[in-house]
Image (spheres, helix red, strand yellow):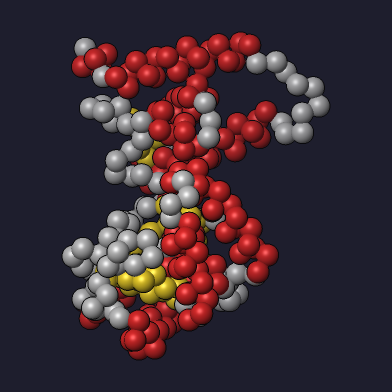
């Protein structure tokens, strides 16, 4: 009875009917350039990636469909399969979709990544205590970054990232630090793709701040956010490279302007370089 009264339950019922209707009426297009199975797999990965970007709050069906730029019926159909496979779970009280336990189980096949994360947690915990700030490790994931480690605390920094948070690269000093280490054409492609997503999600209101952050970062040769997106929240970042000299991550510190004024940039760069070097040594386990 509780679930029937939930407004999201009505939404899902409507999506299920819509899904059946679409499946029955959709014509087969001969000679389509992409095979249906490939399209379904790509769509499923997109939905799963989006679900994983909100491990705490989860997603309503309608919001998830909008974020994926897909119709509700399609997303509902994909979610049903993902729930069956335990890759996604649905919380009973609000019917939101969240990452499922199968994701953790699959991750056990990569023990070296867990080992690197534990090492990074130790390094950043000591660093955050030393600097009295928030220190984070962001991993590159295609055109996005994923917050992998967050240590320390600082009041009123505007830092809303936690392990599992996934965002476009252009939206963080850490993402910009990674972009600086990429080939020019790849950087331009990612910036264009990220900007398109930014406009779809937030409109044009933050574009000037994002541009300002990239320009200042280019001037100083590191990721730098001096309150460009959130007032009184400063962030500094350097890329972390693997043995092939590819930027696969970034180390970030965030704090208030009085903690990290722009006049201290050279000192902060040296401290970040020391931590990035330590993380690069530990990352060797990923290539063993």
Q: Quadrant of the N terminus?
A: top left
User: In this image, 34 relative to 7: left or right?
Assistant: right
With respect to residue 97, does 251 lie above or below?
below
Residue 244 in picture, x, y percent from top left? 60, 74
Q: Tell me where residue 254 appears, x and y as whole percent.
A: 30, 70
Check the image and report above or below for 250 versus 52. Answer: below
Kindly give the residue lying farthest to the left in the view shown: 155
Residue depicted at x 54% and y 53%: 195
Asked whether the viewer can see residue 285, the reply is no
| Residue beneath the point at 55% across and 72% down | 180
- Tell me what residue is drawn at x 52 percent, y 26 percent: 71
Compare residues 58 and 191 and report the one nearer the observer.
Answer: 191
In the picture provided, is 154 more to the left or to the right than 101? left
The image position of residue 7, as x and y in percent, is 29, 19
In terms of image quadrants, where is residue 9? top left
Spot occupied by residue 68 in the image (x, y as percentages of width and height): 50, 37
Residue at the far right: name it. 31
Instruction: Report whether 12 appears left or right of 179.
Output: left
Give the residue displayed 42% in from the left and 78% down from the top: 276
**Picture mark count:** 0
- The answer to whether residue 133 shows anywhere in this view is yes
210 or 45, nearer to the observer = 210
């Amino acid at each position: 009875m509780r679930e029937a009264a939930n407004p999201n339950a009505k939404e899902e019922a409507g999506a299920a009917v819509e899904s059946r209707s679409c499946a029955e009426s959709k014509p087969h297009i001969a000679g389509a350039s992409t095979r249906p199975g490939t399209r379904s797999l790509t769509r499923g990965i997109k939905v799963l990636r989006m679900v994983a970007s909100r491990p705490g709050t989860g997603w309503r069906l309608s919001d998830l469909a909008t974020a994926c730029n897909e119709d509700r019926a399609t997303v509902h159909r994909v979610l049903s399969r993902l729930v069956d496979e335990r890759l996604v779970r649905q919380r009973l009280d609000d019917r939101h979709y969240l990452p499922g336990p199968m994701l953790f189980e699959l991750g056990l096949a990569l023990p070296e990544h867990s080992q690197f994360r534990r090492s990074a947690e130790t390094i950043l915990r000591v660093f955050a205590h030393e600097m009295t700030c928030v220190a984070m490790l962001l991993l590159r994931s295609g055109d996005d970054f994923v917050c992998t480690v967050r240590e320390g605390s600082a009041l009123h920094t505007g830092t809303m990232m936690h392990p599992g948070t996934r965002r476009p690269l252009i939206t963080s000093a850490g993402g910009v630090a990674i972009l600086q280490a990429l080939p020019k054409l790849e950087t331009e492609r990612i910036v264009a793709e990220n900007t398109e997503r930014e406009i779809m999600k937030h409109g044009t209101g933050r574009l000037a701040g994002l541009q300002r952050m990239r320009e200042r970062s280019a001037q100083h040769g590191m990721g730098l956010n001096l309150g460009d997106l959130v007032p009184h929240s400063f962030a500094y970042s350097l890329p972390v490279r693997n043995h092939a000299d590819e930027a696969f991550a970034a180390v970030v510190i965030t704090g208030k302007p009085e903690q990290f004024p722009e006049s201290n940039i050279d000192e902060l760069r040296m401290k970040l370089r020391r931590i990035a070097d330590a993380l690069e040594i530990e990352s060797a386990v990923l290539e063993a």
